[in-house]
Image (cartoon, rainbow, N blue to C red):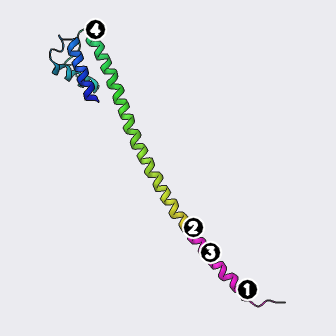
Amino acid sequence: MTLLLGVVAGFVVTLVDRDAFPTFGDGLWWAIVTLGTVGYGDLVPTNSAGRAVGSVVIIVGVTFIAFLTAVVTSSIVSSDQEKAAEAEKRRREVSDEDTRKLLREVVERLAVIEARLDDRPTRE
């Protein structure tokens, strides 16, 4: 997307500001550097139309980079949250199974105790 924007902006600035950008290569270089928010200053628009194109390129570049950063960050955070939720789910499943096992052992011991109590002679 950045490359496409750079090509279009480079072509447009070459058309509107021939004095500062005599070749498409100059316009493309300037557009890519400007979109990337680097702005070396080796090539700059010299007329109003070129500056208008430059303003749009700067705004699009900054906005696009911010948007791209947000999307990538959101994707990474979302992936981490999904992994953490899955790990927590597995931990709970193991914990629940351990609890069921312990409860079965308790029930078995209680059954043995009750059987022993039932086998005891009663006092009357």
Q: Quadrant of residue 62?
A: top left
Mark-to-mark CA distance, 1 and 4: 103 Å
Q: Which residues are magenta?
A: 98-124
In this rendered view, identify the residue nearer to me: 10 or 45.
10
Label whose residue precedes the other's in the sequence (1 or 4): 4
Label 3: how many Cα within 10 Å (few below 14, some 14–19, many 20+): few
Q: Quadrant of residue 39?
A: top left
Mark-to-mark CA distance, 2 and 4: 75 Å
From the top left corner, tell me how far across and down residue 46 is, in percent.
23, 10
The N terminus: image quadrant: top left
From the top left corner, tell me how far across and down residue 40 is, in percent.
22, 22
Amino acid type of disc 4? Ser
Label whose residue precedes the other's in the sequence (3 or 2): 2
**Is residue 103 shown left or right of residue 120?**
left
Q: Is residue 90 above or below residue 69?
A: below
Can see residue 39?
Answer: no
- Helix, strand or loop for disc 1: helix
Mark-to-mark CA distance, 3 and 4: 86 Å
From the top left corner, tell me how far across and down residue 8 is, in percent.
25, 22
Q: Which mark is residue 35?
A: none
Q: Which mark is residue 106?
A: 3
Q: Which residue is mark 4?
A: 48
Task: Please report the residue visible at 70 percent of the width from the left and 81 percent of the height from the top.
Answer: 114
Q: Which mark is residue 99?
A: 2
Q: Main secondary structure of the magenta part?
A: helix
Amino acid type of disc 3? Val
Task: Please report the residue visible at 38 percent of the width from the left and 31 percent of the height from the top.
Answer: 67
Mark-to-mark CA distance, 2 and 1: 28 Å
